Amino acid sequence: MTAHGERSRVENRGLVEMGSDHWLDALLGRVPHRPAALATPPAGSGLRPVPGDRGLPFVGMGAHTARYGPAFLLALMRRHGPVSWWRAFGRRIVAVSGPEAVQVVLANRDKAFVSGWPSVIGPWFDGGLLAMDAPRHLADRRLVQAAYGEGAVDGYLRLMAEDLDERLDRWPVGARFELVGAVRELSGQITARAFLGVPYDGVGKRVVDAAEECIRAETALARVRLPGTRWHRAHRARAWLIRHLGEAVPEARARAGEDFLSVLSRVEGFDDRQVALHALFTVIASHDTTTAATLASAYFLGKHPDWRERARAEAAGAPTRDAAAVDRLTTLDLVVRESIRLVSPSPILMRVAARDTEVLGHHIPAGQLVSVCTGVNQLMPELWSRPDRFDPERFEHAEDRGRRLAWAPFGWGGHKCIGMRLGMLKVKATLAALLRRCEWSYPESYEAPWRFTSLPAPRDGLPTVLHRV
């Protein structure tokens, strides 16, 4: 291949472009866009209507969203600009992409936008920071912040380290297994111990299983509480979780442990139900997003032996029982940052227009659901050199510095994820423990088929064979 050919070859094509190799890609490629304006701006406002695609009746472009994720939204921006809309399963959704449009919505200087998560994923996060708006969001955030202090985080990491060693020693060696399920279970095991102070083999597993019922319901199309439906099971699971966690709060406070629930229970200003709701949100959000980030990082480490060996050499013999020790794993930090740039655990942030407003001169009507596409920013060639490439050194060279909202996998501004640091530490500690024990790799020809129905994960389960080092 010529030097020019090397430069032009697209890497990680499935993450930056909509596919064309599968029969389903060919079928989706035949769906007509059917361009249309979202809504007529008020007379004399000087605003423009939001352009976008209707797609198929009812389904719209929903199947494209689920299959291609940010790559579809990137293509939508290319067709219609940084403020556009698409229809998905009966809903019209405005997409804002690019630094300027994203900042307008997230800065929310005129207080025109409120959280859109409850209307999208359901009531599972009610009472948690994600579903709150000012002024309650700010008040609760200040109180919850006490559970994320450096001393508290060190305590969580000590509990994680104890479970990581034991659990990873049980993983199969020399036999093919699906890494997606294994990482998800491992995250649940760590969550039970470090966040709830209970062993996974018992009530901890029941808590994690109930939380996963809520996670599965986020993508339910039939949102009716009929027995046997995903929606009904999730409502029952959440009711049990609130009841169980509410009863566990006084016990957690009395034992004065290092786990998240114990620490949060000692924060003055919350009653037991508020502690339970914030703990429930933390369990669901941390479990799901760190699973996605760990999978993406493990995949790219398996694809890039140079980075895998560099990270292993750094992790060898290094303790990961406190934040300072994990922070010294600078290679893993670069790897994780680049991995969640390419495969963002939360590539969109949902908002709703509380009243008629505008974004970059486009009319946004009251009640309109808005998807803030931070994951698109992370793939834009206008913001990154060769955004299709896995290149952790771009963060070593601070390529994201001075490029506003180029990298924002944890949100931005007042609603930036409060658990960002702890989540990164959890992912890096998990990967370091795995690297110290095992070797794994994926063929050069293999490209993980990512799905985006909920948080991203390979559709094939990411078949993996581990070998002891």
Image: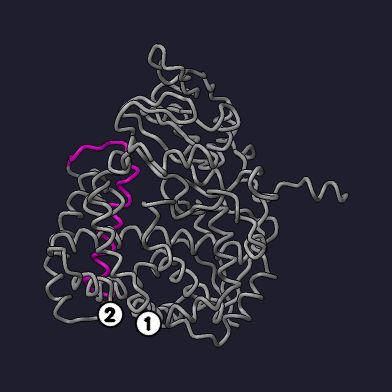
| Residue 178 visible in the snapshot | no
| Mark 2, residue position | 258
* Vertical comparison of 105 with 273: above or below: above
Q: Which residue is mark 1?
A: 158
User: For the point 26% across and 48% down, which residue is it?
Assistant: 132
Query: In the rendered structure, which segment of residues is drawn in magenta?
Result: 200-226
Outermost residue on the bottom side: it is 317
Residue 8 — which label? Answer: none
Q: Is residue 377 left or right of residue 310?
A: left
Q: Could you tell me which secondary element the residue under label 1 belongs to? A: helix
**Predominant secondary structure in magenta?**
helix
User: Which residue occupies 48% across, 36% down?
Assistant: 96
- The residue closer to the viewer here, 86 or 465, is 86
Q: Nearer the viewer, residue 314 or 399?
A: 399
Q: Secondary structure at mark 2?
A: loop
Q: Which residue lies at the image location 27% right of the left edge and 77% below the top edge?
A: 199
Is 225 located above or below residue 364 in the figure? below
The x and y percentages for residue 253 are 16, 76
Residue 32 lies in what quarter of the image? top right
Say which amino acid is labelled 1. Arg
Instruction: Give the side of residue 331 with respect to residue 270, left or right.
Output: right
On screen, residue 301 versus residue 444, left or right, reads left
